[in-house]
Image: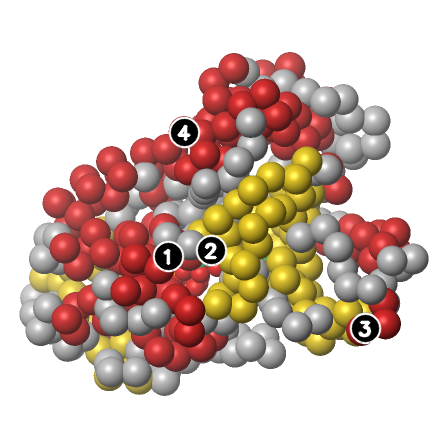
């Protein structure tokens, strides 16, 4: 099989490494045209510790990428135990593609004709697959900051839904030393700069900081079910049939509630590699494995709808609780049930000024 992987993010890079272990030598294309200081797509770099298993599968050791563990995090004022940590993602992306043929350019339509299979691992761009049948995109703004040593450090690693007037949250992730990622994201959110400014202003009594970089981006929170088709066949100018298959965020393997996509992109790439590039088998496995994402997406749709104005239903609260458990976050059930109140607060008041608890 003659395979081109478009995109050298976590899904494309990991897939290339897995296929190499199976004796296949895909060509990887990525121009990495990101206006970011780290050189890759904007991301908080937060992952659960079980990413270790995925990395070990291709001979990499999580400890080589560990920046800072997050044994406990603040969730809107409630501190809970977590298995999360931050990784040096740019370094990991470099190592994923060390032994593969990486062309430092995007895959052109003419060049794509040379391959039997084109894997669309282009994340939010979804450059080769047709549009998702029902896309849902969450705009973000993230900054990397260095807290001044004399400022006493930045307390409050965590996520704060109550700072966002809508479905979304503000996050603070430590990157080791005195550096942090601070970001905001929310469905339909437009006031990113204002919200970050507000946060810094309120925290100015506790620390001083320098902004190292900042970037805007988007997260696809559609779920794979609503990001179909996951593959399609097309006929080239030479009359030959070709297969295009999506992997990772291009097909929505992201938690719709939290925007976590790294670990699920790795899992998705593994499913594709294990399917022997059989698209039907792969699509069925992805839809089954990530069916919980469909349910989370449906909760978001509900909360965004007119009916959702009455607040989350029991099943929405249950999905939120399941989400926390899946990520290994030790939120007690009652607290988890309450937390979704901050997700739905805006439904009562889209400006979030007087919002009730949902
Ligand atoms: C602000 C922000 C914070 C986030 N924080 C977290 C987090 O803390 N934890 C977490 O788990 N997830 C997080 N995510 C989500 C996570 O980053 C993604 O879900 C994950 O990186 C998806 O991996 P991917 O390889 O599928 O896509 P991407 O990482 O987007 O990689 C796609 C690659 O394709 C390349 N590309 C694009 N177009 C083309 C083309 N035409 N030809 C060739 N290459 C192309 C791009 O250059 C890119 O390198 C965050 C996302 C954002 C935006």
Image quadrant where one finds the N terminus: bottom left
Q: Quadrant of the C terminus?
A: top right
**Whole-number angstrom distance, CA of label 3 to CA of label 2:** 26 Å
Question: Dot 2: within a 10 Å radius of its alpha carbon, few (fewer than 14), some, or many (20 or more) residues?
Answer: many
Q: Measure how far apart labels 1 and 4 are at the Cα level.
A: 23 Å
Image side of residue 79 versus residue 52, left or right = right
Disc 3 + disc 4, Cβ < 8 Å: no
- Is there CB contact under 8 Å for labels 2 and 1? yes
- Seen in the picture, residue 307 relative to 73 is either above or below; the reply is above
In the rendered image, which residue does mark 4 sit on? Answer: 295
Q: Quadrant of residue 246?
A: bottom left
The residue where tag 1 is placed is 51
Where is residue 123 shown, x and y percent of the image?
41, 60
Q: In the image, residue 60 lies at what x, y percent?
A: 31, 71
First in sequence: mark 3 or mark 4? 3
Helix, strand or loop at label 3? It is loop
Q: CA distance from mark 1 to mark 3?
A: 31 Å
Give me the disc on residue 47.
2
- Assess mark 3: CB under 8 A from ligand 1? no
Instruction: State how far apart marks 4 and 2 are (Cα).
Output: 22 Å
Residue on which the image places disc 3: 148
């Amino acid at each position: 099989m003659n395979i081109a992987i478009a995109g050298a993010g976590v899904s494309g890079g990991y897939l290339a490494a897995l296929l190499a272990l199976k004796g296949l030598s895909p060509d990887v294309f990525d121009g990495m045209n990101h206006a970011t200081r780290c050189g890759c797509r904007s991301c908080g770099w937060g992952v659960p510790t079980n990413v270790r298993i995925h990395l070990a599968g291709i001979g990499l050791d999580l400890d080589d990428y560990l920046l800072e563990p997050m044994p406990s995090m603040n969730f809107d004022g409630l501190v809970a135990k977590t298995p999360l940590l931050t990784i040096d993602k740019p370094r990991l992306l470099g190592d994923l593609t060390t032994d593969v043929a990486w062309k430092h350019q995007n895959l052109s339509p003419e060049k794509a004709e040379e391959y039997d299979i084109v894997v669309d691992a282009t994340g939010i761009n979804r450059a080769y697959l047709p549009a998702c049948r029902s896309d849902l995109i969450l705009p973000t703004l993230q900054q990397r900051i260095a807290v001044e040593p004399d400022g006493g450090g930045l307390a409050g690693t965590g996520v704060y839904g109550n700072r966002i007037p809508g479905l979304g949250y503000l996050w603070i992730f430590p990157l080791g030393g005195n550096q942090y990622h601070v970001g905001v994201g929310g469905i339909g959110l437009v006031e990113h700069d204002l919200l970050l400014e507000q946060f810094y202003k309120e925290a100015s009594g506790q620390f001083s900081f320098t902004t190292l970089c900042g970037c805007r981006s988007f997260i696809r929170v559609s779920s794979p079910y609503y990001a179909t088709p996951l593959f399609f066949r097309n006929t080239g100018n030479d009359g030959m049939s070709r297969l295009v298959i999506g992997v990772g965020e291009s097909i929505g393997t992201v938690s719709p509630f939290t925007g976590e996509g790294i670990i699920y992109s790795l899992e998705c790439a593994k499913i594709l590699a294990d399917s022997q590039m059989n698209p039907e088998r792969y699509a069925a496995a992805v839809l089954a494995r990530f069916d919980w994402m469909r349910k989370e997406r449906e909760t978001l749709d509900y909360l965004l709808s007119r009916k959702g104005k009455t607040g989350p239903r029991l099943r929405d609260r249950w999905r939120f609780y399941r989400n926390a458990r899946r990520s290994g976050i030790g939120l007690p059930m009652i607290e988890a049930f309450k937390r979704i109140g901050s997700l739905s607060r805006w439904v009562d008041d889209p400006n979030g000024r007087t919002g009730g608890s949902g």
